[in-house]
């Protein structure tokens, strides 16, 4: 939670009250047995439209001849308080402005329009606060002579010093921001030119790569066309081979049938029987001849 430092204002009020004359005549009042009367001024110096009624401590029915009149702080105290508040607000805005400058100088993908608008708004607000404080300070310096003129001059000098420091700090921040912004733009322009040249070279390279890809696609298309023709030819050859294989299988089956038929025919024919009888007879004759030679 934000708080305001009131020590300086308290000291100003205290010093102002010390410098006020307080006439006291209590002899008549004490002799008559009544209490002293404390009367406040009927008009507020801080708020002219507000009035106060006298505050009395005397007994009812008794009159008081002595009174203590206490005046409120002079009007310049209120003015100095307002100037001090403006100075504090200006310092807070200066901190926000420094953060806005740092954010605006950071590289980003956007155009930074919102950051620049925020910087302009903060700068305008700080300038207005300084101008208002300067006007109030002039009004404070034009105040008439009074018993607390030394205090007023010291306060005025302190506030003027604070305003001067804030003005110098604001000018420094603006100068530094503009300088860095220009440097950033120059660097950005050089970087942009380098990026542009690099982009041109990259574009040429991309076009060359695209042309190569197009040529590769055309080659692949031609290869696919040749493959399709080969597939058709291979399909025709495969069909022919299949047909020939089927024909060979049919022919082999028919030949097998013919061989089986011929085998049956040979087994059932008379020639086989005759040949068998002749072979047996030859073998018998051979045996007889061998026996004849041995025996005779």
Image (cartoon, helix red, strand yellow):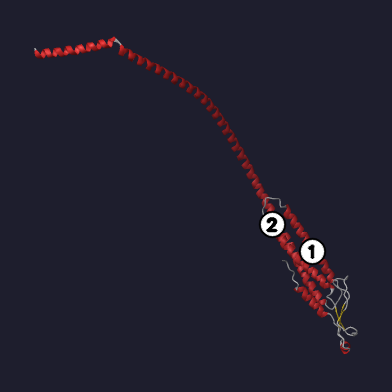
Q: Residue 76: percent from the left, percent from the top? A: 83, 72
Name the residue rendered at 66%, 48% in the picture.
192
Q: Residue 157: percent from the left, percent from the top? A: 79, 72
Q: Residues within 10 Å of mark 2 (few under 14, many from 20)?
A: some
Q: Residue 284: percent from the left, percent from the top? A: 18, 13
Q: Secondary structure at mark 2?
A: helix
Q: Is residue 94 left or right of residue 38?
A: left
Q: Residues within 10 Å of mark 1 (few under 14, many from 20)?
A: many
Per the image, the residue denoted by label 1 is 129
Q: Is residue 98 left or right of residue 83?
A: left
Q: CA distance from mark 2 to mark 1?
A: 23 Å
* Residue 172, placed above or below residue 109: below
Q: Secondary structure at mark 1?
A: helix
Name the residue rendered at 59%, 34% in the picture.
214
Q: Is residue 198 left or right of residue 287?
A: right
* Residue 28, placed above or below residue 186: below
N-terminal label among 2 and 1? 2
Per the image, the residue denoted by label 2 is 103
Q: Between residue 56 and residue 106, name the one nearer to us.
A: 56
The quadrant holding residue 151 is bottom right
Tell me the number on the disc at residue 232.
none
Q: Residue 231: percent from the left, percent from the top? A: 51, 26
The quadrant holding residue 90 is bottom right
Placement of the N terminus among the 4 image quadrants: bottom right
Name the residue rendered at 30%, 11% in the picture.
269
């Amino acid at each position: 939670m934000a708080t305001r430092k009131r020590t300086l204002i308290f000291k100003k009020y205290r010093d102002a009250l010390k410098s006020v004359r307080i006439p006291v005549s209590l002899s008549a009042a004490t002799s008559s047995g009544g209490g002293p009367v404390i009367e406040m001024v009927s008009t507020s110096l801080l708020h002219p439209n507000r009035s106060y009624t006298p505050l009395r401590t005397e007994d009812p029915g008794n009159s008081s001849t002595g009174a203590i009149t206490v005046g409120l702080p002079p009007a310049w105290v209120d003015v100095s308080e307002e100037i001090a508040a403006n100075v504090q607000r200006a310092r807070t805005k200066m901190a926000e402005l420094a953060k806005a400058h740092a954010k605006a100088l950071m590289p980003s993908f956007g155009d930074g329009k919102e950051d620049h608008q925020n910087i302009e708004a903060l700068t305008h607000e700080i300038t207005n606060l300084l101008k208002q404080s300067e006007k109030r300070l002039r009004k404070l310096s034009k105040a008439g002579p009074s018993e607390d003129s030394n205090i007023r001059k010291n306060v005025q000098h302190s506030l003027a010093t604070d305003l001067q420091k804030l003005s110098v700090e604001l000018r420094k921040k603006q100068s530094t921001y503009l300088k860095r912004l220009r440097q950033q733009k120059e660097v950005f322009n050089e970087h942009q030119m380098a990026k542009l040249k690099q982009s041109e070279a990259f574009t040429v390279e991309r076009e060359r790569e695209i042309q190569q890809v197009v040529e590769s696609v055309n080659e692949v298309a031609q290869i696919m066309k040749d493959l399709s023709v080969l597939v058709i030819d291979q399909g025709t050859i495969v069909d022919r081979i299949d047909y020939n294989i089927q024909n060979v299988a049919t022919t082999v089956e028919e030949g097998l049938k013919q061989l089986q038929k011929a085998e049956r025919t040979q087994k059932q024919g008379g020639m086989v029987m005759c040949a068998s009888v002749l072979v047996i007879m030859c073998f018998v004759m051979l045996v007889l001849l061998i026996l004849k030679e041995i025996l005779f």
